[in-house]
């Protein structure tokens, strides 16, 4: 099957042509159902119809997934969060629940006057078989300088270089992932109303695939999953029904380079302890 390209069409139809067991990970950010005033988000007359439609595309994606693959499905908070709760319940009865990730958007949205301000989205994770591929080491998060400095001051650790090397590896990421949502003024924004941050999608790609694996996004939008996959040396296939978004995604991909490195600045215990970090005792 051809990879690293966008299918401009309907996901439910296009997915039928995919062979079983093809992709290592599915990253799906589907329409939410009447949250946005966009044609693609208001195409169902009632919630039951949306749930039925969701079951069709998820079933196809689970068929296409490899035995050790994971499927990530975003759900929207706000006025309609209960629809996603119904969807999660339905999906968990049919498929194997693996995890529920909370994407902490850092900044609240939606200006609700009658409740706390919504500030997270859910990402349901389903697995196909009992032993999914999961690269826990690939999604470590750096400690902040203050924490590193305070650990280095701990007298129980004699070998400070070894201790620093260990600390610089970072800590394991929890299933609450804090990545700021994209503001209108963000340089990453390319004109899609629900564009996800590249940093967030990259974490999902990193934890669920190895270089060379194939990632599928059935609702590609502005192409975030494809850009993340391309940057990280994974193959990808995207499906998107809106021609304008396909063009936006293609333009983004044309400006995307290959593998990138994440670098951290601190290299020695003395540098950490000499830095202007205020230490907690
Ligand atoms: C929530 S957005 C995805 C945004 C994307 N994650 C990004 O970062 O840009 C959902 C996308 O699904 C597309 N879409 C809606 N119904 C579709 C269908 N039946 N088949 C394929 N794409 C569809 C919409 O046009 C929209 O771009």
Image (spheres, rainbow, N blue to C red):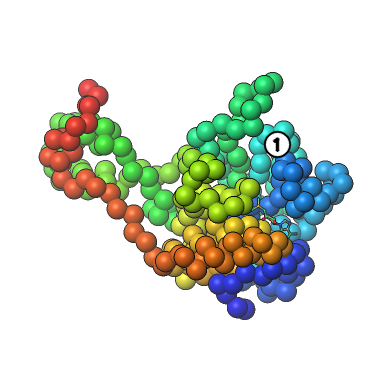
Does residue 227 sit above or below 136 in this rendering? below
Q: Is residue 110 left or right of residue 40?
A: left
The foreground one among 38 and 81 is 38
Q: Is residue 68 above or below residue 179?
A: below
Identify which residue is drawn at 60% across, 68% down. 237
Q: Residue at coordinates 18% horizontally, 38% vertically from top-left?
A: 272
The percent position of residue 32, horizontal first and vertical second, equals 71, 46
User: Callout 1: few (<14), some (14-19), or many (20+) C-alpha neighbours within 10 Å?
Assistant: some
Quarter-of-image position of residue 171: top left
Residue 243 rendering spot, x and y as whole percentages: 69, 64
Work out whether 74 lies above or below 65: above
Q: Residue at x 60, y 45 (%)?
A: 123
Q: Which residue is at 79% across, 47% downward? A: 42
Q: Indicate the position of residue 7 as horizontal and vertical percent values.
A: 67, 70
Q: Nearer the viewer, residue 114 or 20?
A: 114
Q: Toward the viewer: 157 or 54?
A: 54
What x and y, as percent, mark residue 245?
Answer: 64, 60
Q: Secondary structure at mark 1?
A: helix
Which image quarter holds the N terminus? bottom right
Answer with the quadrant where ligand 1 appears in the image.
Answer: bottom right
Q: Which residue is mark 1?
A: 81
Q: Is residue 126 visible?
A: no
């Amino acid at each position: 099957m051809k990879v690293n390209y966008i299918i401009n069409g309907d996901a439910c139809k296009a997915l039928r042509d995919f062979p079983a067991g093809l992709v290592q990970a599915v990253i799906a950010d589907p329409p939410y159902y009447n949250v946005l005033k966009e044609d693609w988000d208001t195409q169902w007359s009632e919630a039951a119809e949306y749930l039925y439609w969701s079951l069709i595309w998820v079933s196809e994606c689970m068929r296409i997934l490899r035995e050790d693959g994971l499927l990530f499905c975003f759900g929207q908070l706000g006025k309609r969060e209960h629809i996603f709760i119904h969807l999660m319940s339905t999906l968990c009865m049919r498929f194997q629940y693996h995890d529920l990730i909370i994407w902490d958007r850092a900044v609240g949205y939606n200006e609700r006057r009658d409740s706390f301000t919504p500030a997270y989205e859910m990402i349901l994770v389903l697995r196909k078989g009992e032993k999914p591929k999961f690269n826990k080491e690939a999604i470590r998060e750096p400690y902040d300088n203050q924490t590193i400095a305070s650990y280095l001051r701990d007298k129980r650790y004699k070998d400070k270089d070894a201790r620093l090397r260990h600390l610089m590896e970072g800590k394991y990421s929890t299933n609450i992932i804090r990545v700021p949502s994209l503001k209108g003024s963000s340089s990453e924004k390319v004109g899609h109303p629900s564009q996800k941050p590249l940093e967030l999608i990259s974490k999902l790609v990193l934890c669920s695939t190895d270089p060379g694996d194939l990632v599928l996004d059935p609702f590609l939008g502005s192409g975030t999953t494809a850009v993340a996959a391309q940057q990280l040396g994974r193959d990808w296939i995207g499906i998107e029904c809106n021609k304008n978004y396909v063009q936006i995604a293609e333009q983004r991909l044309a400006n995307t380079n290959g593998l990138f490195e994440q670098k951290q600045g601190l290299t020695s215990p003395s540098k950490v302890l000499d830095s202007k970090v205020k230490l907690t005792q």
